[in-house]
Image (spheres, rainbow, N blue to C red):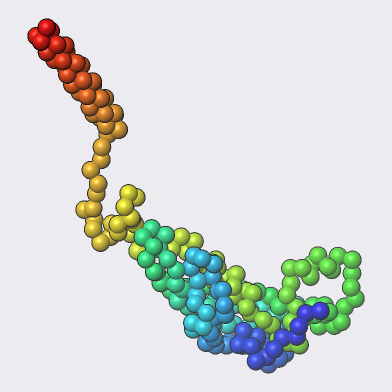
């Protein structure tokens, strides 16, 4: 059994003032503290407790209450290129229908039909005339956040060899050595060693003959 909604929760909204008059409108503005884990874990998100500004438009329709809104907040993360902290201003738009429970389009109590279960899965029922915006808010914010946040569009990232910041030192580089030349240098060094050994051996032979 689902827990009843708590009207003291800042993300729970009451629709009783609308009544069930199709076409009735209500506009709401609310500043709330961001709930925990509002974003993409380990990538970017709105810090817990940070202010989230919410603008809502509630419209009464035959089936229930159509909620349209925008949430604005500052998100923080880590640049995927240089690993520096990033900040992004997020504006997340959303729209959701909250239906009157157990009522047809004329507001009368309806009997359950065999196909009703499939339809109900796509509708969120109002509970005592209230709805919880948090699930919708989470989905909207995640979609509005950058999947690969960067500190700036032209971020140069880090040096692949030593990890130095290429933003701070654009001229940073390492002398590249062609692996083919490196192999030849090693071969030349090896041949030089062998030649020295052979020469030393020949000189030793000459010295022995002279002694005889």
Rendering quarter of residue 95: bottom right
- Residue furthest to the front in view is 212
Say if 198 sits above or below 152 in the image.
Answer: above
Q: In this image, 19 relative to 9: left or right?
A: right
| Residue at image coords 56%, 73% | 37
Measured as percent of width and height from the top left, residue 109 is found at: 87, 82
Measured as percent of width and height from the top left, residue 27 is found at: 58, 87
| Residue at image coords 52%, 73% | 92
Measured as percent of width and height from the top left, residue 136 is found at: 62, 74
All told, the count of numbered labels is: 0
Say if 189 sits above or below 89 in the image.
Answer: above
Image quadrant holding the C terminus, namely top left
| Residue at image coords 22%, 27% | 189
Res. 107 visible in picture: yes
Measured as percent of width and height from the top left, residue 165 is found at: 30, 59
Image quadrant holding the N terminus, namely bottom right
160 vs 49, nearest the viewer:
160
Res. 188 visible in picture: no
- Residue furthest to the left in view is 210
| Residue at image coords 69%, 75% | 97
């Amino acid at each position: 059994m689902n827990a009843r909604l708590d009207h003291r929760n800042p993300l729970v909204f009451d629709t009783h003032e609308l009544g069930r008059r199709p076409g009735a409108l209500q506009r709401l503005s609310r500043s709330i503290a961001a709930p925990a884990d509002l974003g993409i874990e380990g990538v970017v998100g709105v810090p817990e407790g940070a202010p989230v500004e919410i603008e809502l438009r509630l419209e009464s329709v035959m089936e229930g209450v159509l909620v349209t809104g925008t949430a604005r907040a500052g998100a923080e993360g880590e640049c995927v290129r240089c690993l520096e902290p990033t900040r992004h201003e997020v504006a997340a738009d959303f729209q959701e229908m909250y239906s009157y429970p157990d009522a047809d389009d004329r507001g009368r109590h309806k009997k359950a039909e065999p196909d009703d279960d499939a339809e109900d899965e796509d509708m969120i029922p109002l509970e005592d005339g209230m709805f919880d915006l948090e699930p919708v808010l989470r989905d909207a914010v995640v979609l509005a956040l950058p999947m690969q946040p960067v500190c700036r569009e032209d971020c140069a990232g880090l040096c692949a060899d030593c990890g130095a910041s290429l933003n701070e030192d654009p001229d940073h580089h390492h002398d590249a050595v062609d692996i083919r030349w490196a192999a030849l240098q090693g071969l030349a060094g090896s041949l030089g060693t062998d030649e020295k050994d052979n020469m030393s051996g020949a000189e030793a032979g000459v010295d022995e003959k002279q002694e005889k």
